[in-house]
Amino acid sequence: MSSYVQRVIQKVVERNPNEPEFHQAIKEVLESLEPALQRHPEFEQAGILERLTEPERQVIFRVPWVDDQGKVQVNRGMRIQFNSAIGPYKGGLRLHPTVYPGIIKFLGFEQIFKNSLTGLPIGGGKGGSDFDPKGKSDLEVMRFCQSFMTELYRHVSADMDVPAGDIGVGGREIGFLFGQYKRITALHEGVLTGKGLVYGGSLVRTEATGYGLVYLVDEMIRDKGKSFAGATVVISGSGNVAIYATEKVQQLGGKVVALSDSSGYVYDKDGINVDTVKRIKEVERGRIKDYVNTHPSAEYHEGTGIWNIKCDVALPCATQNELREADAEALVKNGCFAVGEGANMPCTPEAVDVFIKNKVMFAPGKAANAGGVATSALEMSQNSMRYNWTFDEVDAKLQDIMVSIYHNAADTAREYGHEDNLVVGANIAGFLKVANAMLAQGVV
Ligand code: NDP
């Protein structure tokens, strides 16, 4: 490792103690940038890595709200605006009890490179709260979202920072957040993406991350003479990304045999029925184990173990660090030939090493799950134009973007001497555009 990269990593760890996810993301990216840094000594002189790893702005705020029993609850809200070199900050809001600045920084940092890779003019940011929407009534979620936006509105706008959904934030939450923003500012503007279709949302946004993941993985495996047709696929999670990845795999002729949630996983040897999962998760807000109620031939297993199921392609779509070294070894042993990260950083660094060593095709999250944010940027474009594209128009643009992200990452990897390593390719390709924009804009 060069002394420059080493120094920056050390400084980040000292400055941000007790934030292991952020350290992990920084190390993974900076170490892979070595070949680009060697070719561009001007980046060190301009302090590009020091600036990239320090968010431009971080806001942490109190979110008081009243529960259904009339008791006041207090959560912590935050928005981390990481880098605006190539466009307004863009990135989701996560509502989950594990949210703290270390998670939001890791996600915001990754978002810079992902957004750059889409080829669209969007910077990187992320936010959220330790509020747990699970088990809360609609009215409690609304009161929380209104209180959250009562502070957040000062820091966001259509041209400054445009949040979207993430874990725990779907159409319902975006609606409540948008309503409150509009009430406070009197502006009906594209300040959030993932909006409902009747008030400024884009067709395909709901499907975008899952569909985009499958478009990119499809291009990657077709490049090596494989295809989804007839392939057995295991997908973790059963939220937004997992559901639409399942749907697209099935449209391409693959068979998804397992899905999970944080309690356990279902295995259906006949192929998961995606309509049942949509009903359970999107309408009833139930658990994946409910799947066996209507599909008694499927099996439900409590706890982890989903990666021991034999498959050709694995798509981790749940959460960070959910696929570890032993899981990667089990997948390799069972003949898995491709892995695509639908979630952000779902594979630990040790698991990624196992895939790369064993020549398993591996698509890192910042390339593979960029379809969500890309379609969000298309939603921003439509809001600015006050115009809507059809489903097929947006879907075609999404597909083009995912195919070009794959080729950009693969070509960059080859150019920098790391053929077939999309981790290196995606990081360098995403980085160069942002670094050059920062150089052009002076010391800011
Ligand atoms: P959702 O909240 O819709 O779904 C998350 C799913 O993952 C739920 O089924 C959840 O189960 C499950 N899950 C959480 N933790 C675990 C665990 N430890 N083991 C197994 N399952 C678990 O979120 P999304 O689908 O939107 O997001 C999933 C991932 O994709 C996240 O990493 C997110 O950052 C990333 N992503 C999402 C984008 C989007 O557009 N939605 C865009 C790009 C990335 P449970 O209900 O039990 O918690």
Image (cartoon, rainbow, N blue to C red):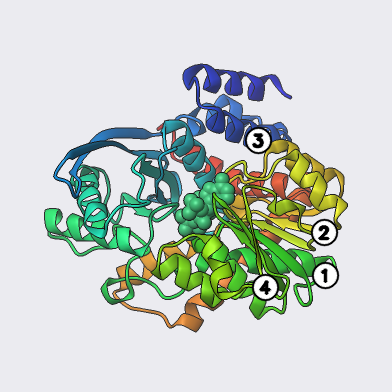
Q: Which residue is mark 2?
A: 337
Task: Residue under label 3, please give it.
Answer: 28
Q: Residue at x 33, y 43 (%)?
A: 131
Relative vertical location of residue 344 with respect to residue 377 in this rendering, above or below: above
Q: Residue at x 65, y 35 (%)?
A: 28
x and y, in percent, of residue 344 in the image: 56, 48
Q: Amino acid at mark 3?
A: Glu
* Residue 226, disc: 1
The answer, for residue 268, to whether it is visible in the render is yes
Pick the front one: 115 or 24: 24
**Quadrant occupied by the C terminus:** top left
At 36% from the left edge and 61% from the top edge, which residue is drawn?
A: 193
SS for tag 2? loop
Q: CA distance from mark 4 to mark 2?
A: 28 Å
State yes or no: Cβ of the residue under disc 3 lies below 8 Å from any atom of ligand 1: no
Mark 1 falls on what kind of element? loop
Amino acid on which the number 1 mark rests in the picture: Lys
At mark 4, the secondary structure is loop
Q: Position of residue 95 (x, y in %)?
A: 38, 47
Res 297 label: 4
Q: Is residue 56 left or right of residue 48?
A: left
Does 286 sit above or below residue 70? below
- Cβ atoms under marks 1 and 4 closer than 8 Å: no
